[in-house]
Image (spheres, rainbow, N blue to C red):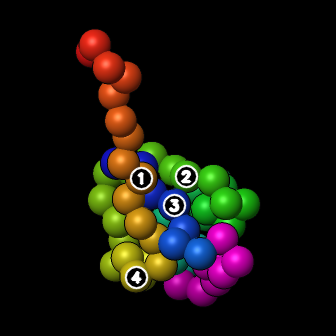
């Protein structure tokens, strides 16, 4: 699944070892980008949303 921060104005703190995500993914989230992840860590579940992907018509 893909996730991103709910609010781009808020950044994830680095406490608790980058909030349960890899450092590179933590940086991407704080830059306003979405990341691919298997499951949402408890430490950030209230601060992120799942990015829904849509398939182009005809596929």
Which residue position holds label 1? Answer: 51
Numbered disc 1: secondary structure: strand
First in residue order: circle 4 vs circle 3: 3
Neighbours of disc 2 within 10 Å: few (<14), some (14-19), many (20+): some
Separation (CA) of disc 4 from disc 1? 14 Å
Do the numbered discs 2 and 1 sit on residues whose CB atoms are within 8 Å? yes
First in residue order: circle 4 vs circle 1: 4
User: Was residue 12 drawn as part of the magenta stretch in this picture?
Assistant: yes
User: Was residue 10 drawn as part of the magenta stretch in this picture?
Assistant: yes
Is residue 32 among what the camera can see?
Answer: yes
Numbered disc 3: secondary structure: strand
For the point 66% across and 81% down, the residue is 10
Instruction: Tell me residue 21's x, y (percent).
Output: 49, 64
Instruction: Tell me residue 9's x, y (percent).
Output: 70, 77
Which residue position holds label 3? Answer: 4
Query: The magenta stretch spans which residues?
Result: 8-16
For the point 54% across and 68% down, the residue is 5
Do the numbered discs 1 and 3 sit on residues whose CB atoms are within 8 Å? yes
Separation (CA) of disc 3 from disc 2? 4 Å
Which residue position holds label 4? Answer: 46
Do the numbered discs 2 and 4 sit on residues whose CB atoms are within 8 Å? no
For the point 67% across and 60% down, the residue is 32
First in residue order: circle 2 vs circle 4: 2
The disc at residue 34 is: 2
- As drawn, the residue found furthest toward the left would be 59
Separation (CA) of disc 2 from disc 1? 8 Å
Compared to residue 36, the image places residue 54 above or below, namely above
């Amino acid at each position: 699944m893909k996730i991103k921060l709910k609010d781009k104005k808020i950044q994830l703190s680095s406490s608790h070892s980058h909030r349960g995500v890899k450092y590179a993914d933590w940086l991407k989230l704080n830059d306003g980008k979405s990341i691919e992840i298997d499951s949402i860590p408890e430490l950030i579940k209230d601060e992120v949303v799942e990015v829904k992907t849509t398939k182009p018509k005809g596929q």
